Amino acid sequence: MREEFAKLKMSKKEITLEATGWAGAFLFLLAYLLISVKILDAESPIYHIINLIGSFFYAIGMFYKRAFAGVFLEVVWSIIAIASLSKIFFH
């Protein structure tokens, strides 16, 4: 059993990148929760900012894992969040 845990040993860089991806996933779930229980709505800048930060963090995690379909998804997600924020602030 000890040998199995030794195989899981990660460098500080790997831990940081993994944690960044998990933080992004947490932010997506938080945004979804806040909109689902009507604490925020789709016009809330906070909702879109949470999604933008979440997509950035998650994209870092996906890039680290070389999951380029996930990176693409998060780039598009970021563009949508930025477009929504610009609509809220500039229209």
Image (tube, rainbow, N blue to C red):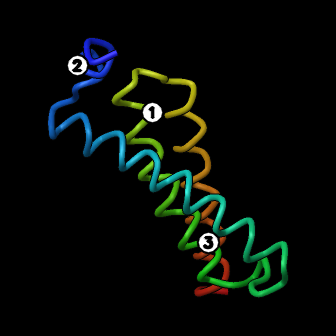
The residue tagged 1 is 62
**Disc 3 vs disc 1: which is toward the camera?**
1
* Callout 2: SS: helix
Quarter of the image with the N terminus is top left
* Callout 3: SS: helix
Contact, mark 1 vs mark 2 (Cβ under 8 Å): no
Q: In the depicted view, which residue is nearer to us: 25 or 46?
A: 25
The residue tagged 3 is 48
Q: In the depicted view, which residue is nearer to us: 67 or 89?
A: 67
* Marks 3 and 1, how far apart at CA: 20 Å
Q: Which mark is residue 37?
A: none
Q: Position of residue 64 (x, y in %)?
A: 34, 29
Quarter of the image with the C terminus is bottom right
Q: Position of residue 66 (x, y in %)?
A: 40, 21
Q: Which comes sooner in the sequence, label 3 or label 2?
A: 2
- Please state if 90 lies on the left or on the right of 57 as rendered: right
The vertical placement of 24 against 82, above or below, is: above
Q: Residue furthest left?
A: 12
* Marks 3 and 2, how far apart at CA: 40 Å
Q: Residues within 10 Å of mark 1 (few under 14, many from 20)?
A: many
The residue tagged 2 is 6
Q: Amino acid at mark 1?
A: Met
Contact, mark 3 vs mark 1 (Cβ under 8 Å): no
The vertical placement of 25 against 14, above or below, is: below
The vertical placement of 74 against 55, above or below, is: above
The residue located at (49%, 54%) in the rendering is 24
